[in-house]
């Protein structure tokens, strides 16, 4: 149920969404949906007590070894955690990230989530990554969103190509920049194949620029609901940037 720009949910829906979404309880007892939680959130509790993570030392240790190899070589690494719903995949990742932080490791974390309702949204996973990285929640005016993407994404890019690269990242993130002074963008908007090539190149260029300054950790939850185009772009980045801390 939606009222004046906010989404109100029933008690039953609140219980279903509580693990993944921030929900505010109003003075009148009604519940209002705020935003999606990140994996930075603490694990769920039972009767107010956090449940310890047991029996996952091997998996967490393997992830730590992969991270060390990724940073020290450096060398791009990929790991896929699979298992039935509710078996504890997200908890393993949470514990792994907590150990990295506790050990003082520095890295840039970006999270994308697959969704059965968005499986046909081309580049939807990457759009989430770019928007989250730039601090965009979707409620800002379009011009503010574009400014935030430009400010964040261009911080490590070469100055001579930053505007063009960010404009193509905007195509991924569904934040469309003016092509008045960008002939490459003008041409790509008339040619779907060229647009695909240019957006993939921009994605790889951005990750390369970021990984020159810090390890980059891309985390995809429910990847089986991810769109094919995003998975293809991720695969391309892993191949092209195989000697980067990605």
Image: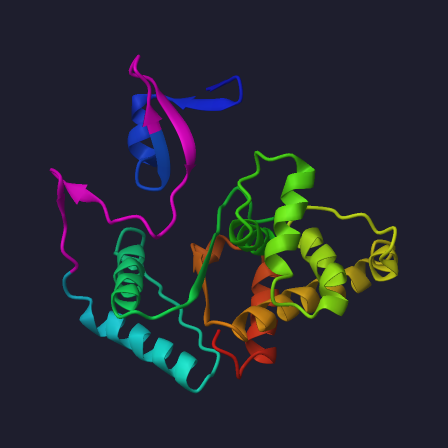
Within the magenta stretch, is there residue 28?
yes
Please give the name of the residue rendered at 48% of the width and 51% of the height, measured from the top-left corner: 114
* In the image: residue 19, left or right of residue 190: left
Predominant secondary structure in magenta?
Answer: loop
In which quadrant of the rendered view does residue 47 lie? top left
Nearer-the-camera pick, 21 or 209: 209
* Vertical comparison of 34 with 77: above or below: above
Within the magenta stretch, is there residue 92?
no
Please give the name of the residue rendered at 49% of the width and 52% of the height, measured from the top-left corner: 225
* Vertical comparison of 215 with 47: above or below: below
Please give the name of the residue rendered at 21% of the width and 74% of the height, measured from the top-left corner: 58
* Residue 233, visible in the rendered structure: yes
Q: Which residues are magenta?
A: 24-53
* Residue 122, visible in the rendered structure: no
* Vertical comparison of 238 with 163: above or below: below
| Percent x, y of residue 213 | 52, 73
In which quadrant of the rendered view does residue 204 lie? bottom right
| Percent x, y of residue 19 | 30, 41
Please give the name of the residue rendered at 25% of the width and 75% of the height, measured from the top-left corner: 61
| Percent x, y of residue 6 | 48, 23
Task: Name the outermost residue toward the bottom.
Answer: 73
Task: Name the outermost residue toward the top.
Answer: 28
* Vertical comparison of 234 with 77: above or below: above
């Amino acid at each position: 149920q939606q009222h004046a720009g906010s989404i109100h949910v029933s008690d039953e829906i609140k219980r279903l969404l509580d693990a993944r979404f921030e929900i505010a309880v109003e003075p009148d007892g009604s519940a209002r949906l705020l935003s999606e939680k990140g994996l930075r959130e603490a694990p769920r509790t039972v009767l107010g007590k956090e449940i310890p993570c047991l029996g996952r030392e091997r998996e967490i240790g393997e992830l730590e070894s992969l991270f060390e190899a990724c940073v020290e070589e450096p060398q791009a690494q990929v790991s896929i955690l699979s298992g039935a719903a509710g078996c504890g995949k997200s908890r393993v990742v949470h514990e792994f990230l907590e150990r990295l932080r506790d050990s003082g490791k520095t890295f840039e974390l970006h999270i994308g989530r697959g969704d059965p309702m968005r499986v046909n949204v081309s580049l939807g996973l990457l759009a989430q990554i770019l928007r989250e990285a730039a601090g965009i929640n979707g409620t800002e005016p379009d011009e503010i969103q574009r400014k935030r993407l430009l400010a964040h994404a261009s911080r490590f890019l070469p100055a001579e190509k930053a505007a063009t690269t960010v404009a193509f990242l905007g195509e991924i993130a569904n934040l469309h920049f003016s092509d008045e002074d960008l002939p490459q963008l003008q041409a790509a908007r008339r040619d779907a194949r060229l647009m695909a090539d240019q957006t993939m190149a921009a994605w790889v260029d951005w990750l390369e620029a970021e990984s020159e300054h810090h390890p980059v950790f891309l985390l995809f939850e429910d990847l089986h609901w991810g769109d094919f185009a995003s998975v293809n772009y991720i695969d391309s980045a892993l191949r092209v940037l195989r000697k980067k801390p990605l």
